[in-house]
Image: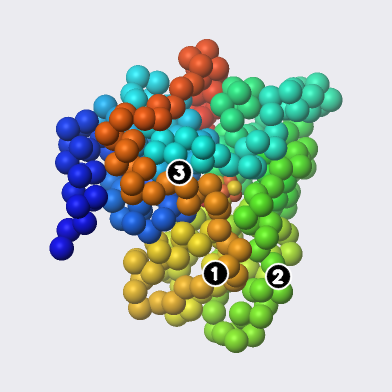
Amino acid sequence: MKDPLVEKINKLKVERRAIIMAHNYQLPDVQDIADYQGDSLELARIATKADCEVIVFCGVQFMAETAKILNPERTVLMPDAKAGCPMADMVDVEELRRMKAENPGSKVVCYVNSHVEVKAESDVCCTSANSIKIVKNLDTDKPIIFVPDRHLGEYTQRVTGRELILAAGYCPTHRHIMLEDIEKMKSKMPDAEVIVHPECTTEILDIADHICSTSQMITAAGASGAKRFIIGTEVGMLHVLRKRYPDKEFFVPSSRCVCPNMKKTTLEKVLWSLEEMKTEVEVDPETGSKAIKSLERMLEYV
Ligand code: 13P
Ligand code: SF4
């Protein structure tokens, strides 16, 4: 039997000429109603091609903001406008300007997990799927500032061999993924492969078989001959992976692998959002027109 809530959402979606986009960390029932699902890079790409009047964005503020920057003429709605990203709050535009002043002539690579003002002050954006390619593409004679994620920055630095000037931001959810938890699980399942997100700390990255963005995890698990996987990222990924590979088993290392902000969006709020056409994401046009350049540069590079 069809869920009446889902039926109402689907009907209103057609009336409003809306599409629903969802990040891989969303609650399972929200993932299941999405027209498009993916990691930050895929969602940004889809946003540039969206054939619709309204985008209902199920994710966190910086993702919905990115969709709005890339689609200034479309209405972008967030079912829960309070779903933020603590990492994005860790570097503001004043802090970035200070870093630039201390490092004259530098180029700024800005992880998309950042506010629009920070993107506007940056040269190029990156996501966890492409930070290495982006940094490799930059001139070798200029210092590179990387904001806000220290761990993704350290990882990118290690792989590219380029020295980066790092900010001190981090993701609380990924920082709480503990080496002991993974080791305990691995001792019970020695055959399991470990796939982790580059927002994890270096000691976690050091023991991983694969380090990748959320959507790249789907490819890594599919290409591997292993049957069991320990997934070092937010718990929402389990639904994505179990649906895609029902013959394989997926586990997160602990019950702390939860991003509370990603869990704020529910089906009820998606329906409310479409009914009331709320909450609309607003981006100051002048700041947005600067920020779009760093996003477009990223999309061009990769
Ligand atoms: P992805 O771009 O890999 O999906 O990651 C987004 C994010 O917020 C990870 O915490
Ligand atoms: Fe931000 Fe971490 Fe949540 Fe991703 S998982 S949205 S980086 S707080």
What residue lies at 40% left-to-right and 27% top-to-bottom?
280
State which quadrant residue 107 falls in: top right
**Vertically, is 80 above or below 157?**
above
121 left or right of 63? right
CB at mark 1 closer than 8 A to ligand 2? no
| Residue nearest the viewer, comparing 125 with 149 | 149
Compute the Cα span from label 2 to label 1: 12 Å
CB at mark 3 closer than 8 A to ligand 2? yes
225 left or right of 195? left
Which residue lies under the disc numbered 1? Answer: 252
Which residue lies under the disc numbered 2? Answer: 179
Circle 3 Cα neighbour tier, 10 Å, few/some/many (<14 / 14–19 / ≥20) = many
Give the residue type that dot 2 points to: Leu
Give the residue type that dot 1 points to: Val
Which residue lies under the disc numbered 3? Answer: 59
Circle 1 Cα neighbour tier, 10 Å, few/some/many (<14 / 14–19 / ≥20) = many
Which residue extends farthest top?
Answer: 286
- Is label 1 in a helix, a strand or a loop? loop
Dot 2 or dot 1, earlier in sequence: 2
Residue 272 picture location, percent across and down: 32, 38
